[in-house]
Structures are given as C-alpha cells and as structure tokens.
Amino acid sequence: MIYERAADIVLDDVFLHLPGFVDDARVFLKLEGLNPAGSVKLKTALALVEDAEKSGALRPGSRVIESSSGNLGVALAVVCAAKGYPLTVVSDPHATRQSIRMMESLGAEVVEVTQRDANGGYLQTRIEHIRRRLTEQADLVWLNQYANPANASAHRDWTARALHEGLGHIDALFIGAGTTGTLMGCVEYFARHSPHTRIIAVDSVGSVTFGRAAPRFIPGLGSSRRPEIYRDTGAFDKVLIEEADAITMCRLVAARYGLLPGGSTGTVLAAVRQLGPALPSGARIAAISPDMGDKYLDTVYSDPWVADRYTEYAELASLDTTLSAR
Ligand SMILES: Cc1ncc(COP(=O)(O)O)c(C=O)c1O
C-alpha cells in the first residue's frame, strides 16, 4: 500500500490474539503502536488538527501549542511536520527522554514544566503555562485534547469502528483512560452499533478521573485533573489498577507472547486478567494497546527503576512460576 504522507499510515486493523490469557475466553489486543507516531494518539492528533483547520482557527502561519506528557506530542509533531505548522509541546518530568527527543527531531519546540500542581501531578501547571503563552502570542492555537470533542469523535469514527469491523462480536471491551478520548468515542459508537458490548474503563490507582490523587510514575494513563470531555454516562464499568500490577503484566506479556507492550497496555491487560474470568464462558474480549514498550525500557522494564518506586513490587521473582504454570 502506498501512502502520500507518513501521518496517514494509521494502521487501524491490526489485532493480536492472546491464547490462554484468560481461561475459556478469547482475548484480542488492538495494537495501536505500529504507526509512524507509535501510538493511538496519531488519530487524535489528525482529528484535532483537521478540526481546527475546518473551524478556521488554524491557518497557514499559525503555531500549534499543546500539553502532552509524550504520545500526543509525538503524534502532533508527525502531523504538524507533514502539514507545515510549527509546534510547541508543553511537557513534564514524566515524559520519557525518547519521546522528547522524537518530538524535537520532528521539529517541535518542547517546554518542560517542573512544578507539581495541587493534585501532585503536572497537568494543571502545563495548562497554566499554555494560558500564559496564549495571552502573549496571537497566532498560537491551543488544541486542548482534554476539552476538545474532536478527541472523542476521532475514536468513535476510527478506533471503535475498526474494532467492530475487525473483530465482529465483542462481549467485553477494555479501554484505558487518559484524556478519555478513546473511551468516550468507543462508548458512543458501541452504544449505537453494538449495545450488548460491555465496556470497561481502566485507570491507574492515583488518577483522579475515577479515583483519588496519589503519586503515579507511568506516563500515558491516568490524569491529575478530570478531563472536560469525560462523562460518567453509567454506560461503562470502571476499574482501577495498581501501577505495580501493570508492570507485572507488561513483563508477563513480553515473556509469554513476544510482544513488548507499553505501560498502559499492561494496565489494561491487568484489568482483563482481573475481570475476564468472571465473564461468561467463551467470551470474546477486546483490549486496546495504546503503544509499544520501546519507550519504557528505562522505566517499566528496568529493575532498578521499578525497585526504587514500588516497594510492594514482588512479582518479578514469581514471574517464571506464573509463566510455567500456564
Ligand atoms: C500510552 C497511552 N495510553 C493510554 C492513553 C489514553 O488515551 P486517551 O487519552 O484517549 O484516554 C494515552 C493517551 O495519551 C497514552 O499515551
């Protein structure tokens, strides 16, 4: 297949079957990390930029600004490079070195804020920085993924449709919640086209979207401020996963299936392992894998990094036993 722009290589139809992941069920992982931006956020970035163009807010000569701890920033850098818009990404110490280097190499300016907000995260500080810049620079356009409906509609029109068309009948769909764009888009699509599909929203312990603020270290999932696009419609279940369990799951999937998943994929799969056995026998389960693990080699996949942050993390030692018992 020949594409005219790297940003159009979305690859929305790649699924990996995980045999034996949950007894008496079939588990399919939708791999979102294989496109040129390396994450589900390529679709979000395309939708945010094209929506701003359509509304007339974004014009030739405008500069785009956005808050991102990594994946959206990289995806916007891919899209803005292709379309010729200069880009500023406001990031924080949770972003991986590799993501920052990728954004910069794709031509973006990256600003790192370092002061924690009242919830212990950086999101509020990043947003205050953007608001200040907007008052100083007239040609700056803030896409605001946390409040922009185009974030959710990207996943309603692409991610959810691709799941439904690619997998057919789905009994349960597990989705990680960051900005909740993927979640809200899938909730809307499945309510209309496959209402029997049970949707399970997965967040990290310490994120304020479903729970209470506490320190978190894995970027991507969770938020220190409830996103404006999030609506608790009652149409989905919610589950909170400890970061240590997400790390265990990442390592298990890498060793058992030869797929190196990103941190939030581990979070989502930990929820599948927790709730999957209670689903009816023969259930078809889908889970969204937002990115791959190469960005997390120095964090999720680093023993010293894990030992420094998760005193309760003891699963590493028992991983071999867990695998051989399967
Ligand atoms: C690695 C990773 N996982 C999960 C998510 C959550 O996706 P969403 O923002 O659509 O809720 C993101 C979003 O940035 C992400 O980068």
Image (cartoon, rainbow, N blue to C red):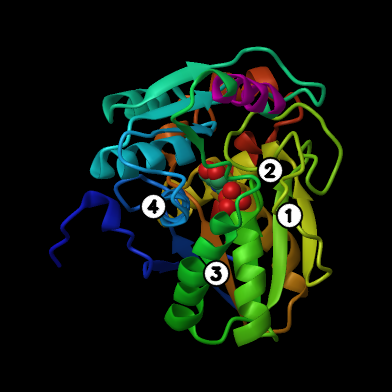
Task: Look at the image and tell me whether residue 27 can be seen.
Answer: yes
**Contact (CB < 8 A) between labels 4 and 2?**
no
Residue 230 position in % (x across, y down): 73, 54
Task: Label 2, secondary structure: give it.
Answer: helix
Residue mark closest to the camera, 1 vs 2 = 1
**Contact (CB < 8 A) between labels 1 and 2?**
no
Give the residues in magenta: 124-134
Residue at horizontal 48 percent and vertical 17 percent from the top: 111
Instruction: Identify the residue position indicated by label 3 in the image.
Output: 156
Callout 1: 10 Å neighbours few (<14), some, many (20+)? some
| Amino acid at pointer 3 | Arg
Q: Main secondary structure of the magenta part?
A: helix
Instruction: Identify the residue position indicated by label 2 in the image.
Output: 245
Residue at horizontal 33 percent and vertical 45 percent from the top: 79
**Contact (CB < 8 A) between labels 3 and 1?**
no
Residue mark closest to the camera, 4 vs 1 = 1
Instruction: Identify the residue position indicated by label 4 in the image.
Output: 258
Inter-mark Cα distance, 4 to 3: 30 Å
Earlier-in-chain disc, 4 versus 3: 3
Residue 10 position in % (x across, y down): 33, 59
**Contact (CB < 8 A) between labels 4 and 1?**
no
Task: Look at the image and tell me whether residue 28 can be seen.
Answer: no
Earlier-in-chain disc, 3 versus 1: 3
Front in this rendered view, residue 147 or 177: 147
The magenta stretch spans residue 268: no
